[in-house]
């Protein structure tokens, strides 16, 4: 390809020179305008050498590139260059057309430049010839060494691979022109690691040894160096490759010891681990395919060994229950192997490894063992038998302790059965197969010590008792029948077809017989001998005025041993019918049938519940009404009696008020001296207000008179100190916009409020009712 490009370039140069020579051979021929056609223009040619320049030239700038020249002969001709690099990188001598490079060129950055050449008039700057484009190509020199795409590579290859196994393909890039011979060709060479790997072709690394063992050396480091064909190389032409060996299953397992001894209790659960057999396998867990097997001994069906590749061990598990009383020690030989290993990886290694296992069984106090996994007994219903069947459990230990039996009450809630100390089961109540055909009992066997005390060891077994059927139920109707007949039904009219069932076990050859208990009726029963019977009209015409419902007793017998007969009553309703025999008016059967005792009890309970709820609601409403009636006068009381936070201590408070004054007045005694809180004489000794007495009414006592006096004292004296019973605030404060806060600031007789409701509050408010209530004599005056 390179040679072809050089030939094309030489051919282009030759054609250019030939054209220039042809033009130069006729330089003196001048054509006047009269000799030329007016509509044609003379064609002129650009003439220049082929434009090439080497990159990174060492000479002083500027560097000569080539010459451009046109065939136009004009004394005012001037050459110009246009393009992105014109004036910056390349310039032209306007007189000679010589092109120069004013910068050192790098082909790896810009391999060629596109320019436009112009020939113009110096004075007018007009084009004397059409612009022509040309290219300046930069010739490559070998100034770049190969460079790797990255400095570190990671690769992997399976261990023990054959020689020549490919590992990784490396790539280094030379920026020089690949069309120039030996400029961009890359040569790879191993600088480190050539004893185990080699490099072939364009950067392909492959194995050079077949004994690459991961368990010995898991990773290799190799260094690769590159250079071009002319030997040019640099620091960036070196790369490091880390090669990891992938594990393969090339190692057989080996037991860590030749003898394993275990001790295990005899009550260990089947499938539970009893010990571990450790092996040494340097392969990774996913490649450990160890297989354990028992090669000698008769216990292959007693134990199994499950591999655990993660922990490099085999787990021994029992497959059957162990019994110390039968076998105290197990001894057998085991082997470990790996059937998945490729034998090509091995050289003289044994494919099997064996060890000896000894398992010692230790004795434990075991619970009793039943002789059977379950028991099945049969018992006829309506019988009480002292012996239904027996269960038997024994102590498996050498002590051979006695066993006690019991029935779990959760399995015999009705307490129908019992069991004695010998395991004999009996029933204490008669059984009814139609109620429970099967009984599933749980029998416990408890180990007893020499004193008969349970040792805590017990076992259970299921006992299934099947109740056998006896013919103890008489036949009855298969379903409730709602029979209807027209009052004008003709003789022989079919009323209903009946059938029967039996709660007992019905054999295939069961036969039911039907008959009327009395012939004194207007119905006839016909036995169809297929366990059904037809009820038809006997004489015809029914009188609804005499009986709207007929109760027909029917006898039904079975063919059991002994044969049982039952009576079922068929209720036939007499209805009015139209001409087509359709029922138009029938009495409801529910009105004719009596109500059961259970229904009556349920109705009574409902009525009683409703009555109790109604009574509670009534009492609640009454209490609320009374509460509202009493609370209705509360705002009125608050208008006259204001409650303040400052209250005395009652009779226990002897400093604020001396209650002995009240006691002395009540008993007619003299008033004791009052404390020094108020030195003024009390007004109640001076003011005597006659009490108001209704004709025939009982006069109030001295206590009422004292309260009247105190009220007058509070009405007329606003500056007195507060007392225990009445609080008087005579001083409201300066500049207060509020009115008086005293509840007793005015005479109560001026109030429009009626305090007669105090008479309804009981004896506790009797005094207040007399004080604030209206006087009947005053009412008469009005």
Image (tube, grey):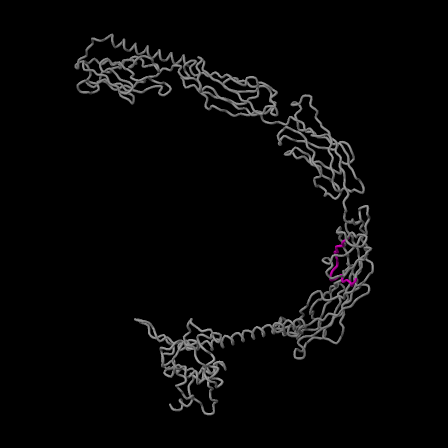
Q: Quadrant of the N terminus?
A: top left
On the image, the x and y values in percent for residue 252 come to 67, 27
On the image, the x and y values in percent for residue 307 come to 67, 34
| Residue at 54%, 73% in the rendered image | 617
The reply to whether the magenta stretch includes residue 437 is: yes
The reply to whether the magenta stretch includes residue 65 is: no
The residue closer to the viewer here, 220 or 135, is 220
Quadrant in the picture for residue 592: bottom right
Residue 22 horizontal side relative to residue 305, left or right: left
| Residue at 33%, 13% in the rendered image | 58
Residue 150 horizontal side relative to residue 109, left or right: right
Quadrant in the picture for residue 324: top right
The residue closer to the viewer here, 471 or 445, is 445
Q: Is residue 494 above or below residue 133?
A: below
Which residue, as the protein is rendered here, is positioned at the far bottom? 695
Whether residue 701 is visible to the viewer of this picture, yes or no, is: yes
Q: Quadrant of the C terminus?
A: bottom left
The residue closer to the viewer here, 129 or 50, is 50
On the image, the x and y values in percent for residue 176 come to 40, 17
**Which residues are the magenta region?**
428-445
Q: Is residue 449 above or below residue 321?
A: below
On the image, the x and y values in percent for residue 51 come to 31, 14
């Amino acid at each position: 390809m390179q040679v072809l490009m050089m030939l094309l370039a030489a051919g282009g140069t030759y054609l250019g020179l030939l054209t220039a020579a042809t033009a130069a051979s006729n330089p003196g021929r001048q054509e006047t305008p009269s000799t030329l056609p007016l509509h044609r223009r003379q064609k002129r040619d650009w003439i220049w050498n082929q434009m090439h320049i080497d990159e990174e030239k060492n000479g002083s700038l500027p560097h000569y590139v080539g010459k451009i020249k046109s065939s136009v002969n004009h004394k005012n001709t001037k050459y110009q260059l246009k393009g992105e690099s014109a004036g910056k990188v390349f310039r032209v001598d306007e007189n000679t057309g010589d092109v120069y490079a004013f910068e050192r060129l790098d082909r790896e950055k810009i391999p060629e430049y596109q320019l436009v050449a112009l020939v113009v008039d110096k004075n007018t700057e007009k084009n004397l010839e059409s612009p022509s484009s040309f290219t300046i190509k930069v010739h490559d020199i070998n100034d770049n060494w190969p460079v790797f795409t990255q400095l570190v590579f990671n690769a992997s290859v399976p261990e023990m691979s054959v020689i020549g196994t490919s590992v990784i393909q490396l790539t280094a890039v030379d920026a020089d022109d690949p069309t120039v011979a030996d400029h961009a060709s890359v040569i790879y060479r191993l600088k480190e690691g050539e004893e185990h790997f080699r490099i072939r072709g364009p950067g392909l690394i492959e194995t050079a040894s077949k004994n690459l063992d991961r368990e010995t050396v898991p990773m290799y480091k190799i260094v690769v160096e590159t250079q071009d064909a002319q030997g040019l190389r640099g620091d960036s032409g070196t790369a490091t490759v880390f090669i990891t060996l992938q594990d393969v299953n090339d190692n057989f397992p080996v037991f860590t010891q030749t003898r394993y001894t275990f001790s295990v209790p005899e009550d260990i659960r089947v499938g539970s681990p009893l010990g571990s057999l450790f092996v040494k396998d340097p392969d990774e867990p996913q490649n450990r395919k160890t297989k354990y097997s028992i090669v000698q001994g008769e216990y292959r069906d007693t134990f199994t060994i499950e591999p655990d590749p993660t922990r490099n061990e085999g787990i021994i598990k029992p497959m059957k229950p162990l019994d110390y009383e039968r076998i105290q020690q197990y001894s057998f030989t085991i082997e470990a192997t790996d059937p998945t290993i490729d034998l090509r990886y091995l050289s003289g290694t044994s494919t099997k490894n064996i060890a000896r296992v000894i398992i010692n069984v230790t004795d434990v106090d075991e619970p009793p063992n039943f002789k059977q996994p379950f028991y099945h007994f049969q018992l006829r219903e309506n019988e009480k038998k002292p012996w239904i069947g027996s269960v038997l459990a024994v102590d498996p230990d050498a002590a051979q302790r006695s066993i006690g039996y019991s029935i779990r009450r959760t399995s015999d809630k009705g307490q129908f059965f019992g069991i004695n100390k010998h395991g004999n089961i009996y029933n204490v109540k008669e059984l009814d197969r139609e109620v429970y055909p099967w009984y599933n009992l749980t029998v416990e066997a408890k180990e007893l010590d020499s004193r008969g005390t349970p040792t805590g060891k017990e076992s259970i077994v299921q006992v299934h008792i099947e109740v056998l059927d006896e013919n103890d139920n008489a036949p009855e109707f298969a379903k409730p029948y709602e029979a209807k007949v027209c009052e004008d039904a003709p003789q022989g009219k079919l009323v209903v077809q009946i059938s029967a069932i039996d709660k007992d076990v019905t054999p295939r050859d069961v036969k039911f017989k039907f008959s009327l208990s009395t012939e004194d009726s207007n119905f006839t029963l016909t036995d169809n001998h297929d366990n059904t019977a037809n009820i038809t009209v006997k004489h015809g015409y029914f009188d609804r005025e005499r009986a709207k419902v007929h109760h027909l007793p029917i006898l039904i017998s079975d063919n059991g041993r002994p044969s049982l007969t039952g009576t079922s009553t068929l209720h036939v309703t007499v209805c009015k019918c139209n001409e087509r025999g359709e029922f138009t008016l029938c009495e409801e059967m529910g009105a004719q049938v009596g109500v059961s005792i259970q229904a009556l009890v349920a109705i009574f309970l409902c009525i009683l519940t409703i009555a109790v709820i109604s009574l509670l609601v009534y009492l609640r409403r009454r209490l609320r009404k009374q509460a509202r009636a009493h609370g209705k006068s509360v705002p009125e009381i608050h208008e006259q009696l204001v409650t303040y936070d400052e209250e005395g201590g009652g009779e226990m408070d002897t400093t604020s008020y001396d209650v002995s004054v009240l006691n002395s007045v009540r008993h007619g005694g003299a008033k004791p001296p009052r404390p020094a809180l108020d030195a003024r004489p009390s007004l109640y000794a001076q003011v005597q207000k006659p009490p108001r007495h209704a004709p025939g009414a009982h006069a109030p006592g001295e206590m009422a008179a004292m309260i009247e006096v105190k009220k007058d004292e509070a009405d007329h004296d606003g500056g007195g100190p507060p007392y225990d019973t009445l609080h008087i605030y005579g001083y409201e404060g300066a500049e207060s916009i509020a009115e008086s806060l005293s509840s007793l600031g005015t005479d109560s007789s001026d109030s429009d409020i009626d305090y007669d409701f105090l008479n309804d509050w009981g004896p506790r408010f009797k005094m207040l009712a007399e004080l604030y209530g209206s006087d009947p004599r005053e009412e008469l005056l009005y």
